[in-house]
Image: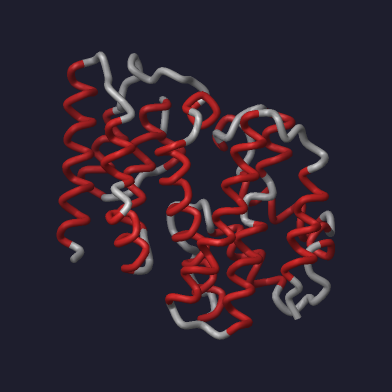
Amino acid sequence: MIDLQKAKKAFKEYVKNYNPEEEKVKLKIAHIQRTSQVAKNVAEKLQLDKEDIELAELIGLLHDIGRFEQIRIYNTFVDKDSINHGEFGAKVLFEDGLIRNFIEETKYDNIIKLAILNHNTSQIQKELSEKELLHAKIIRDSDKIDIFYTLTFGDKKAIWESADLSNDLISDEIYREFMEEHKIDYKQRKTSADILVSHFAYVYDFNFSDSLKFIEENQYVDKLYKRFDFNDKETMKRYNSIYEAAKEFMKNQK
């Protein structure tokens, strides 16, 4: 049995260990709570049964649990400069035993763990069971949907470590990957502008058509694009090309 009220109460207790007025902490709490609701909505649209809808909502609540220690220790959301927050979240929950604060039953443990481990990877690992794969896909889509919301309306400095990216450059390799491969190797990102490009690349990585439709209906790609200008002419040219390619891809998915 999944007791979502207990899980939500446990989450609120856990985040009391961190300063809720600190902008990064506030940002992450809000993102997690919204992602949990988005995951529930995605599961409902897929017409899953009650158990899987509740499990999707629970995974949404737990997917970024590793972010809080990442913020406390490293004061950054950039995994390459700190820790892999998916792997660390799985450790906190399943090696340190925090998972039992959220759910007493153990039968969902492997699904939850694999969903968290796969939510922030470039692609889902192979050889998952049908149910493991389903929930990995749900949390990946749900996370990206709310990240688009956060990027569109959230505090720039809390997200990108800087309120002004105008002097940043888009790296050659990141630009090539986006335009040619439709995916980004996160380890190759060198600048905040590269991280921004990797967010635009999310349009290539949705698992469910309704997810991409939601992004388009809310004009998140357009709104995100309009938040930034770059002083370097070549970077601005690349940025425009990235935006146009993302829009064209979404248009062709209809």
- The reply, left or right, for residue 62 in relation to residue 236 is right
Residue under the image location 30 percent in, 62 percent down: 213
Q: x and y percent of residue 111 in the render? A: 63, 72
- The reply, left or right, for residue 225 in relation to residue 10 is left
Q: x and y percent of residue 35 in the render? A: 55, 56
Name, please, the residue furthest toward the bottom.
Answer: 49
Is residue 194 placed above or below 130 in the rendered structure?
above
Is residue 65 placed above or below 168 in the rendered structure?
below
Q: x and y percent of residue 168 in the render? A: 35, 19
Image quadrant of residue 185?
A: top left
Image quadrant of residue 198?
A: top left
How many marks on residues? 0
**Camera-side residue: 72 or 21?**
21
Is residue 106 placed above or below 215 in the rendered structure?
below
Residue under the image location 36 percent in, 28 percent down: 193
Residue under the image location 28 percent in, 31 percent down: 226
Q: x and y percent of residue 221 in the render? A: 29, 44
Residue under the image location 36 percent in, 61 percent down: 206
